[in-house]
Image: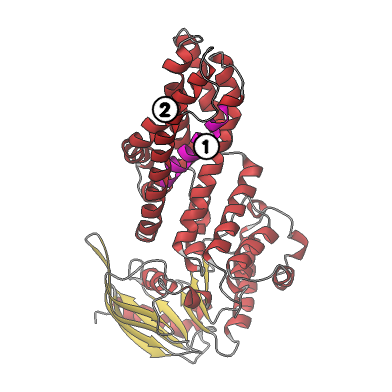
């Protein structure tokens, strides 16, 4: 499904988060949004998720504004550094709740829990989970409805190397499905190298680099990002 | 792709989740009930209650305590969604923003109604309220009064949730708007309680009650509709 941003500006009061971003990504594109803090990466991702609207310009998912179209939002999966899970509910209740919002039956829950190795913790409250378990459950929540577009906002934050690797393997399985696109926002650029086939670097709310990426070399990708963040355009 | 559930189906799912969470934690109902009981206790010691006080100041005491207690509940309306950015999860899901408003509003109605029903016996005890069938219309007033408070309160809870001064901002926004509903609640409750005066007519629905209940119903419908329409703008920014 196509993602499109047309002359997108986003301001928060006097602060400019995005200053005229144009971007089109066809299906099967796996985008890395890189840039320093405050570059506008998360704002752009939130616009694609329909969580907020642009001050100027248009953001479209499959040709429609995600804020106005529930059918288009159905096609999105959002995984963030925050779990987006309810601590007072159990793992199964969380998935049943979100599954219900997507019109899915309860039978999807058990297979989703098995897929992230949490079947034994189905009836445990999420509040008692470790960070790694929470993030695995968050992945199950985000992919319960097999979305066509995965929006990933710093999903590895706060994870130790082993948990990050586990999550990364599972994410890779999801994003490599045919027809699936993804947008990954991360500072951990080396981790991202295996996911992405296009790199967009933002600085001061503008796109300063937009290049295809086929190498799996994380150090090389990090060098590219560092170069565009440090050298004036 | 499964069919996107209807707005009403989403409302039920969201409401059920809030009720399950509240059943486990009691973090909204308990403080509200205790607050009402404390206010009634303070009034009990502060005034000479009983006798004529029942219909002279009773309705005012009752609704003042309900409205202030409701602020505790309203403050917590989006608390669960604030933790772990769960609100983002809901907004990114194929849920109409209106369904979220309706679920939260209905939840607030149920919690407030629960508080009113749980604390009514204590009010009756302090004010020497004679039990009887004449009290039945009180439930209609409770229901419409709760709906009025929740209609405005839910919208402003979402609005104040973005502010650092939300504890201060919410009463400041809600209370002035609620004055017309509060007047109707107090007047309707007064009419009902007067049914307990010995020698009064025994009619179940006094004629003058219709005006006040009608006003309350109108308030609840108008403000629920307005808030439902405005919720989109409030929740996103």
- From this view, report whether residue A149 is shown above or below residue B206: below
Residue occupying image coordinates x 34% and y 70%: A40
Residue A158 in view here:
no
The subunit letter for the residue under badge 2 reads: B
Q: Which residue corresponds to the image point at 38% horizontal and 61% vertical from the top-left?
A: B232
Q: Look at the numbered discs 2 and 1 and tell me whether their residues touch, using CB distance below 8 Å.
A: no
Of A232 and A155, the residue lying toward us: A155
- Which residues are the magenta region? B135-151
Q: Is residue B45 visible?
A: yes
In this picture the colour scheme is secondary structure
Q: Nearer the viewer, residue A201 or B159?
A: B159
Q: Is residue B137 magenta?
A: yes
Q: Main secondary structure of the magenta part?
A: helix
User: Earlier along the polypeptide chain: callout 2 or callout 1?
Assistant: 1
Give the Cα distance between marks 2 and 1: 13 Å
Where residue B145 appears, as percent x and y from the top left, is 46, 37
Q: Is residue A9 left or right of residue A123?
A: left
Residue B140, numbered circle: 1
Point out residue B207 in the picture as x, y percentages from the top left corner: 44, 30
């Amino acid at each position: 499904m196509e993602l499109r941003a047309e002359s997108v500006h986003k301001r928060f009061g006097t602060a400019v988060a995005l200053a005229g971003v144009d971007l089109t990504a066809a299906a099967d594109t796996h985008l890395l949004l890189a840039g320093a803090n405050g570059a506008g990466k998360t704002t752009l991702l939130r616009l694609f998720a329909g969580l907020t609207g642009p001050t100027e310009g248009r953001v479209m998912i499959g040709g429609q504004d995600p804020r106005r179209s529930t059918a288009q939002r159905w096609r999105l999966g959002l995984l963030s550094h925050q779990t987006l899970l309810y601590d007072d509910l159990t793992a199964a209740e969380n998935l049943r709740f979100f599954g219900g919002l997507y019109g899915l039956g309860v039978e999807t829950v058990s297979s989703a829990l098995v897929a992230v190795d949490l079947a034994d913790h189905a009836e445990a409250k999420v509040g008692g989970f470790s960070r790694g378990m929470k993030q695995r459950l968050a992945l199950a929540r985000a992919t319960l409805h097999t979305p066509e577009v995965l929006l990933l906002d710093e999903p590895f934050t706060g994870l130790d190397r082993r948990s990050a690797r586990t999550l990364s393997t599972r994410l890779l399985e999801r994003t490599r499905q045919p027809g699936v696109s993804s947008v990954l926002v991360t500072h951990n650029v080396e981790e991202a190298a295996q996911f992405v086939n296009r790199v967009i670097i933002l600085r001061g709310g503008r796109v300063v680099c937009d290049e295809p990426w086929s190498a799996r070399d994380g150090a090389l990708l990090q060098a590219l990002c560092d170069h565009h963040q440090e050298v004036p355009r | 792709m499964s069919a996107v559930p209807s707005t009403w189906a989403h409302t039920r799912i969201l409401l059920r989740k809030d009720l399950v969470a509240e059943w486990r934690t009691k973090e909204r109902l308990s403080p509200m009930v205790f607050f009402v009981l404390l206010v009634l206790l303070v009034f009990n010691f502060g005034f000479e209650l009983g006798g004529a006080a029942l219909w002279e100041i009773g309705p005012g005491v009752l609704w003042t305590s309900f409205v202030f207690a409701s602020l505790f509940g309203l403050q917590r309306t989006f608390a669960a969604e604030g933790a772990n950015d769960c609100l983002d999860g809901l907004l990114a899901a194929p849920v109409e923003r209106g369904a979220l408003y309706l679920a939260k509003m209905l939840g607030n109605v149920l919690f407030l109604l629960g508080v009113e029903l749980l604390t009514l016996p204590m009010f009756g005890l302090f004010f020497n309220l004679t039990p009887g069938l004449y009290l039945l219309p009180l439930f209609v007033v409770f229901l419409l009064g709760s709906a009025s408070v929740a209609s405005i309160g839910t919208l402003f809870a979402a609005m104040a949730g973005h502010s650092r001064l939300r504890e201060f901002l919410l009463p400041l926004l809600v209370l002035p708007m609620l004055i017309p509903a509060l007047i109707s609640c107090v007047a309707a409750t007064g009419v009902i309680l007067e049914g307990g005066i010995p020698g009064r007519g025994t009619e179940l629905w006094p004629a003058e009650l219709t005006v006040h209940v009608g006003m309350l119903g109108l308030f609840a419908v108008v403000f629920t509709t307005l808030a439902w329409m405005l919720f989109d703008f409030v929740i996103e920014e």
